[in-house]
């Protein structure tokens, strides 16, 4: 019942009223990574991802989760992620915990181990000193002859935990002759909401981003997070029955590009120096399976001189999968350990990926496995070359 076919069978039974939407069904649906590896493998083209999203929506509407868990979920999805201001306040509290010595005290005292959250603590991102929100509304001019103009999605979690990556993205784009706009009215992309079953919230965020970033002046809407790009390319399907937004959503989807996809299309300029590190690229599920983008990141890495070494099953899931590593931590760690075993076979100096969630998970895997390697986003490696 935890196989794709088993889950689809249960969805059909629930839909036809032959199976209760109860604990067993919810457990099997919650355990799914949503990695879409099965969708890639399916010879019949079954849209498993869409089925999973609709099943989770039914669960959120009809299944009574425990009171505390429900309230935490509602606060996180309805209050924190959609509001940069609220997200910033929460992030500052986490940053205080991390830098005041409280986190070190909690780790050293054994409290985290006693509470059984050592693995969760290891997965927590280091909150940035300077959030990306302050750049909302800014324009960064292209260096040299302008070759393009893009709108950049800064993301929600990325803005508070990966602000340096956002800055590196701007530098790489402008270095390659691209004018970068960071539209002021943009918001969270809605990926986490969609994967958790909050379809109406995801639709509301889609409308906000379409209003903020759909403009004839932009050649593309660019993101450096595979999960964000994946859901933004689903806006047309999300809003297909919305009379006001259906056509605009299709226009928006036509402009959405992952940063590696966009840079590979426009072509990189020669870097200042060639890099020589031994790199193993790990495909984010929502780039390889959801968007079908595999070659572009690898070609960019090779262009700047990096030695690319392929590990076994480089497109298998790392276990991050949005918030899966938090809500299904034990399973996530088993998946991660298998992933790191495959990476260890090729002994890379750098483990590259193209998604912030994957980067966090792989960094935790490096520590668990004791590997002598660092984890970096593809854009960070390009930025270093320039």
Image (cartoon, grey):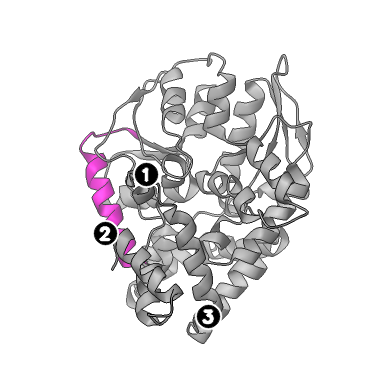
Is residue 38 shown above or below 19? Answer: above
**Residue 62, which numbered label?**
3
Marks 2/1: CA–CA distance: 22 Å
Q: Which residue carries the number 1 mark? A: 40
Q: Position of residue 378 (x, y in %)?
A: 47, 33
Q: Residues within 10 Å of mark 3 (few under 14, many from 20)?
A: few
Q: In what element is the residue under mark 3?
A: helix
In this picture, residue 41 sits left or right of residue 294: left
Eye-nearest disc, 2 or 1: 1
What residue sits 28% from the left and 48% below the top? 339
Q: Is residue 333 magenta?
A: yes
Q: In what element is the residue under mark 1?
A: helix
Magenta stretch, main secondary structure class: helix
In this picture, residue 345 sits left or right of residue 216: left
**Residue span colored magenta:** 328-350
Q: Position of residue 284 (x, y in %)?
A: 42, 44
Q: Nearer the viewer, residue 379 or 42?
A: 42
Q: Which residue carries the number 2 mark? A: 334
The answer to whether mark 3 and mark 2 are in CB contact below 8 A is no
Q: Position of residue 174 (x, y in %)?
A: 67, 25
Q: Name the outermost residue toward the front.
A: 16
Instruction: Find residue 107 and report its image quarter.
Output: bottom left
What residue sits 58% from the left and 67% below the top? 198
Q: Position of residue 285 (x, y in %)?
A: 41, 46
In which quadrant of the rendered image does the C terminus lie? Answer: top right
Instruction: Find residue 182 and report its image quarter.
Output: top right
What residue sits 52% from the left and 80% below the top? 62
Q: Is residue 92 visible?
A: no
In which quadrant of the rendered image does the N terminus lie? Answer: bottom left
């Amino acid at each position: 019942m935890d196989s794709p076919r088993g889950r689809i069978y249960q969805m059909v039974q629930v839909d036809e009223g032959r199976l209760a939407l109860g604990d067993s069904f919810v457990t099997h649906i919650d355990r799914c990574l949503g990695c879409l590896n099965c969708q890639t493998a399916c010879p019949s083209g079954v849209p498993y991802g869409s089925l999973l999203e609709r099943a989770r929506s039914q669960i959120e509407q009809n299944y009574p989760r425990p009171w505390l868990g429900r309230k935490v979920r509602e606060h996180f999805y309805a209050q924190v992620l959609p509001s940069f201001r609220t997200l910033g306040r929460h992030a500052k509290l986490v940053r205080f915990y991390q830098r005041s010595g409280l986190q070190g005290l909690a780790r050293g005292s054994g409290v985290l181990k006693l509470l059984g959250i050592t693995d969760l603590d290891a997965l927590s991102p280091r909150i940035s000193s300077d959030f990306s929100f302050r750049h909302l509304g800014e324009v960064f001019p292209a260096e040299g002859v302008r070759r393009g103009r893009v709108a950049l999605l800064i993301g929600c979690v990325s803005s508070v935990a990966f602000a340096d990556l956002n800055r590196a993205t701007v530098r790489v784009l402008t270095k390659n002759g691209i004018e970068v706009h960071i539209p002021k009215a943009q918001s969270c992309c809605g990926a986490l909401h969609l994967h958790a079953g909050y379809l109406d919230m995801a639709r509301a965020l889609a409308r906000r981003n379409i209003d903020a970033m759909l403009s004839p002046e932009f050649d593309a809407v660019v993101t450096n997070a595979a999960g964000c790009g994946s859901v933004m390319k689903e806006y047309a399907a999300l809003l297909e029955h919305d009379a006001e937004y259906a056509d605009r959503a299709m226009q928006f989807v036509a402009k959405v590009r992952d940063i590696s996809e966009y840079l590979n299309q426009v072509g990189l300029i020669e870097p200042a120096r060639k890099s020589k590190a031994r790199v193993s690229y790990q495909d984010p599920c929502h780039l390889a399976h959801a968007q079908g983008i595999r070659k572009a990141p690898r070609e960019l890495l090779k262009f700047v001189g990096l030695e690319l070494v392929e590990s076994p099953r480089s497109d298998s899931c790392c276990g991050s999968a949005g918030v899966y590593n938090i809500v299904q931590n034990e399973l996530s760690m088993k998946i991660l350990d298998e992933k790191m075993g495959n990476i260890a076979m090729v002994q890379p100096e750098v483990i590259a990926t193209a998604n912030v969630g994957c980067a966090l998970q792989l960094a935790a895997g490096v520590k668990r496995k004791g590997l002598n390697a660092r984890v970096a986003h593809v854009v960070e490696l390009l930025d270093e070359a320039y």
